[in-house]
Every structure is written in C-alpha cells, then in structure tokens.
Amino acid sequence: MKRYKNILIDREDAGKKLLDVVPLAKLKEESWKIVAVSKGGLALGAAIRKKLNNSLEILFSAPIMAPNNSECEVARVSETEEIVINEALVKAFEIQYDYIYGEAHRKHEENILGNIYKYRKGHPFPSMYNEVVLLIDEGSETGSKFMTALKTILNQKPKAVYIAVPILPSDVLEVLEPFVDDIYFLYNVDDYVETDLYYENLEMIDDSEILKLLEENK
C-alpha cells in the first residue's frame, strides 16, 4: 500500500492520466455515454469530458448495510431498483433476504428518489439501449457500485459497456472483467485499503457542485 499512497494528486490529475489509456478516437466517434457511478465519479467524469462532446450522467445507488453492523455493506440497490447482493456476507451473517429487499425498497424511497428529484428534477435515468457506455468512478473498494451499475445498464441492452477507473483492487478487477468489453485503469492494487489514501486531495462534492456539473455536461 505504501507504494501507491498519494499516487494521484486529485480527480483532475486522475482524469488527465485516464485519457492516456482510454481510446479517445473511439470514444468520440462512437459517442460513448459517460456514466458516473458516484458523486466523486461525476467530478472525475467532468474532468475527462473537458475535451469531449460526450454526454455525462450519474446513476444513483444506495448501500444496504448489515442489520447489526452499520459499516458493512451487504448489498446495493440502483435507482431502477436493481439489487446486487454479496452472497458470501449475507450467508456469513445469516441475513434474511426479506431484510435485503425491504431495505432496498426503503433506501430507494428515502434516498435515491430524493437524489433523482434534487439533481435531475425527477427525470429518470436515460435509456442506454444500443448505446456504448463508459462507467466511471474515482476508485473502488469492493466493486459494488460498478456491479450495481452494470446490472442496471446491461438490462437496458446496450451495444457495449466499458469501465474507466484510476485505481482499483486486483480482485475487483478480476470480478468485473467478465461483465464488460474492457476496463481502462492506471493501477490495480493487491492490498487495496480506501480510495482516498491513493489521492493527495480528494475533496467532498457538495450539492451545488453536482448540480453545476450536471448542468454543464448535459
């Protein structure tokens, strides 16, 4: 981990470096849809999009935590109510599926719908049918945001789906690879800890910044 600590300056730096590994010609010619899977990913996507005309969107999701551990994510639900479950954790903690589905519905109603109205004025996530999609995030501890986004996007029957992420765990890379056409990354780390450890500066993204980014990148 020491080798990779603060390997990136900020999202702007990560975006510039990702542009060196993403096939820019194809991205432009095929009008890939850039979809962030987190608020930080949205800021990174905006940094990448500065020299492009591609659309930039965010796909909202919310974590479902273990009933007796508020820091352990056992599943995730997307804004289209697709659910990805960590089966190993659910089995280990003997969590009932009724709890997962109940929490998914509650998180969708209480968290995700609020984000849709706040940031997208109530408009649903646009269809990705027959589109080429580039999913993006600033990092990935467990891969759950990407997997939830993938399940959501693949159900819409896109032409192709790619992932761009500056840094991610080696085991998450192996899990994601079978589901996408390609993954563009800078570093894959065996002993991945937390994403912010690999950036010198990873500022929180406030509401006004998200609204600004979405407005600028329509």
Image (tube, rainbow, N blue to C red):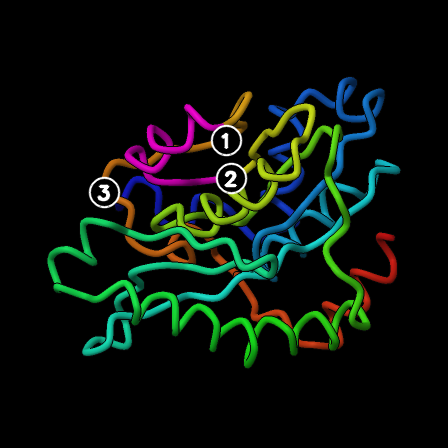
Judged from the image, the secondary structure of the residue bearing numbered disc 1 is strand
First in sequence, mark 1 or 3: give its number. 1
Count of picture labels: 3
Does residue 147 appear to the left or right of 116 in the view shown? left
From the image, tell me which residue sits under label 1: 185
Query: At 69% from the left edge and 47% from the top edge, which residue is drawn?
Result: 45
Q: Give the residue furthest to the bottom.
A: 110
Looking at the image, is 156 positioned above or below residue 61? Answer: above
Q: Residue 40: horizontal and vertical position, in percent?
A: 58, 59
Query: At 25% from the left edge and 36% from the top edge, which residue is drawn?
Result: 190
Asked if the residues shown at circle 2 and circle 1 are in contact, with their CB atoms under 8 angstroms apart, the answer is yes
Quadrant of the rendered structure where residue 212 is? bottom right
Circle 2 packing at 10 Å, graded few (<14), some (14-19), many (20+), is many
**Secondary structure of the magenta portion, mostly?**
helix
First in sequence, mark 3 or 2: give its number. 2
Q: Residue 147: horizontal and vertical position, in percent?
A: 45, 44
Extent of the magenta region: 166-179
Query: At 61% from the left edge and 34% from the top edge, which residue is drawn?
Result: 17
Does residue 87 appear to the left or right of 217 in the view shown? left
Q: Between 3 and 82, which is closer to the camera in this rendering?
A: 82
Q: Residue 22: horizontal and vertical position, in percent?
A: 64, 25
* Label disc, if present, on residue 166 of the rendered structure: 2
Mark 3 and mark 2: Cα distance apart in space? 16 Å
Mark 2 and mark 1: Cα distance apart in space? 5 Å
Mark 1 and mark 3: Cα distance apart in space? 16 Å
First in sequence, mark 2 or 1: give its number. 2
From the image, tell me which residue sits under label 3: 191
Judged from the image, the secondary structure of the residue bearing numbered disc 3 is loop
Judged from the image, the secondary structure of the residue bearing numbered disc 2 is strand
What amino acid is at disc 3? Asp
